[in-house]
Image: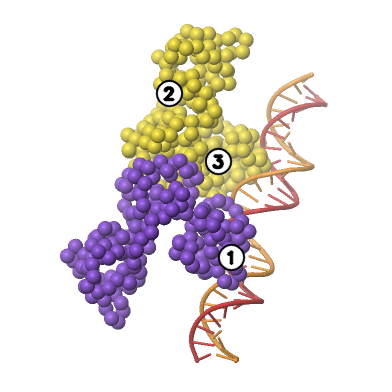
Chain colours: A purple, B yellow, C red, D orange
Amino acid sequence: MRTETVENYLKTIYNLSADNTAVVANQQLADKLDINPASVTEALRKLHELKYVIYEKSYGTRLTTAGVKMALNIVRRHRIWETYLVKELGFGWDEVHVIAEELEHVKNDKLINKLAEILGNPVFDPHGDPIPDAKGKIQKSNFIKLSEAKSKNNYKVMGVTDHSTAFLKYLDKHHLVIGAGVTIKTIEEYDNSIVLICQKKEVNISPKAAECIIVQTI
Amino acid sequence: MRTETVENYLKTIYNLSADNTAVVANQQLADKLDINPASVTEALRKLHELKYVIYEKSYGTRLTTAGVKMALNIVRRHRIWETYLVKELGFGWDEVHVIAEELEHVKNDKLINKLAEILGNPVFDPHGDPIPDAKGKIQKSNFIKLSEAKSKNNYKVMGVTDHSTAFLKYLDKHHLVIGAGVTIKTIEEYDNSIVLICQKKEVNISPKAAECIIVQTI
DNA sequence: ATTAATTTTTAGGCATACCAAAAATAATAA
DNA sequence: TTATTATTTTTGGTATGCCTAAAAATTAAT
């Protein structure tokens, strides 16, 4: 298998399995990678042979130790590049994902470590995702989804799980950037949409959007 | 055809044709790309269909206007990255070629132009090769190969045509870096090897090496 | 002008990474 | 529990980009 193909599968499995705590379904992979389910089955069988995953027919897939190691490496490259693009090259947080998707495949540890060093070895990327260190160690956190937040409480925006330009531009518009403080005003009973206060302005957040915003109690 | 394949062929054709002034032979391409001649024939036929080259059977290949445009774009990306790696990220001129070979395929004009801007829109890369500007315009020069230099004359090292780590390290050892002044002491009649003075020290240059060093009269 | 050497092309194959359609399996609802 | 729906796998195909071996064409040498 081409390394780029392997890397894309492992990275996606890692992300979908919530840090390898859950098993991933073929369908999920097919959706995320925009690939036919039949091709996913085929690829997983090969990845199993290569000992990167444990793939059990009609059950699910999870990464092996070797698979996690490789996945963490790609995730590190991706997140370091995203941070570099924003912090050093002046890109917006809404435009770096696609570029990092290509840059992450450049295989040169010295390069990534040099970028990390210039950035001061950051622990979170511009979307609030943790950056594994050179050894694969990841910062733990007690963040929750905004959809799990309680009424009247105060929170700080720590990250997002949707990296699409559209979503990030929408957040920018309402000043919902990383580090912003928000107060939950009300949670609508009937549809779970959230009304919160950010920068003294009321913002209405749909349940779908609330699923993608990561916050911390303050 | 995959863009990366197209890009590698066009870039190589461009480099081998001396800025598109000559026609390129299949053999040359097969050697440079380390690919079987049969595969080269096949690829050239496709590139011809895609209107990137004019390929005449058993005669040779040259780039079309569209081909030159694309080639210049890749060459620009490659050389901007090499310069950035050396000037901004502290890499040696002998280690950047391989990395740039991967980075050059990342398709984002804004990124390249941003790097160029940070570098002050450089016109030459760390090996002395001219960097096309965003429109594809290239700086002309009156440089010659060291192998064409005359005895007793003074020259300045302007570039190299061999980017291998081994060769560049050899040059570093003798202080033959870009910008260095050299005086031709003698040219051996029988084998054309050159004895020159650099930093007050005598250096013997083989005819093969002299072919790969670019100088300018001073 | 032949012969010899080299280069190029043809022909037939192979692995990768996809696909669509059908069959098998698992999950959900009636 | 059975029927329905959804997911997964199998089967049979495709395009890409490479290969080897052999034939054909070109170039160089005698």
- Give, as a three-letter code, the residue at label 2: Ile
Rendering coords of residue B59 (x, y %): 63, 34
Identify the mark at residue A55; answer none if there is no mark.
1
Kindly identify which residue carries mark 3: B9
* Label 3 Cα crowd, 10 Å radius (few <14 / some 14-19 / many 20+): many
**On the same chain: label 1 and label 3?**
no
Kindly identify which residue carries mark 2: B178
Q: Nearer the viewer, mark 1 or mark 3?
A: 1
**Residue situated in front as seen by the camera: B60 or A18:** A18
- Give, as a three-letter code, the residue at label 3: Tyr
Identify the mark at residue B169; answer none if there is no mark.
none
Q: Tag 2's secondary structure?
A: loop
Question: What residue appears at the point 52 percent right and 46 percent down from the top-left corner?
Answer: B4
Label 2 or label 3, whichever comes before in sequence order: 3
Q: Nearer the viewer, mark 2 or mark 3?
A: 2
Task: Give yes or no for contact between labels 2 and 3 (Cβ–Cβ under 8 Å).
Answer: no
